[in-house]
Image: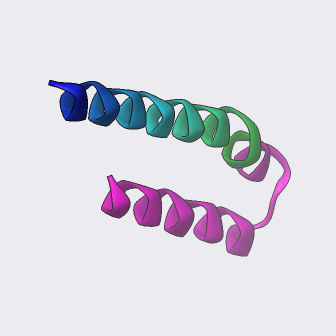
Amino acid sequence: MQLQAVESLVHKAQREVLRGHLSGCVQDAFETGDQNEREQKIAEIIKLLDKA
């Protein structure tokens, strides 16, 4: 039961990190960045999703 609670908290934290990254760095890259920067941000998101 305690492990499930910890896993739930970890997943919630992961979602918040991803949400912050998407609404900050990624949004900026797509609004003002060049193609290379956008591709880097997409790679970062994929890496984060692979860890989840």
Q: Does the magenta stretch include residue 17?
A: no
Residue toward you, 12 or 22: 12
- Side of 45 where 25 appears, left or right: right
Q: In this view, does 19 lie above or below 33?
A: above
Percent x, y of residue 11: 36, 35
Residue toward you, 2 or 15: 2
Looking at the image, the residue that sits furthest to the front is 2
In which quadrant of the rendered image does the N terminus lie? top left
Report the coloring of the rendering: rainbow
Q: Is residue 43 magenta?
A: yes
Percent x, y of residue 22: 61, 39
Q: Is residue 13 above or below residue 28?
A: above
Q: Residue at x 39, y 28 (%)?
A: 9
**Count of all numbered marks drawn on residues in the image:** 0
Looking at the image, the residue that sits furthest to the right is 32
Q: Which residue is drawn at 22% across and 35% down?
A: 3
Q: Residue at x 41, y 62 (%)?
A: 46
- The quadrant where residue 6 appears: top left
Most frequent secondary structure within the magenta stretch: helix
Residue toward you, 15 or 2: 2
Looking at the image, the residue that sits furthest to the bottom is 36
Residue toward you, 3 or 36: 3
The magenta stretch is: 28-52
- Side of 31 where 6 appears, left or right: left
Q: Residue at x 45, y 33 (%)?
A: 15
- The quadrant where residue 8 appears: top left
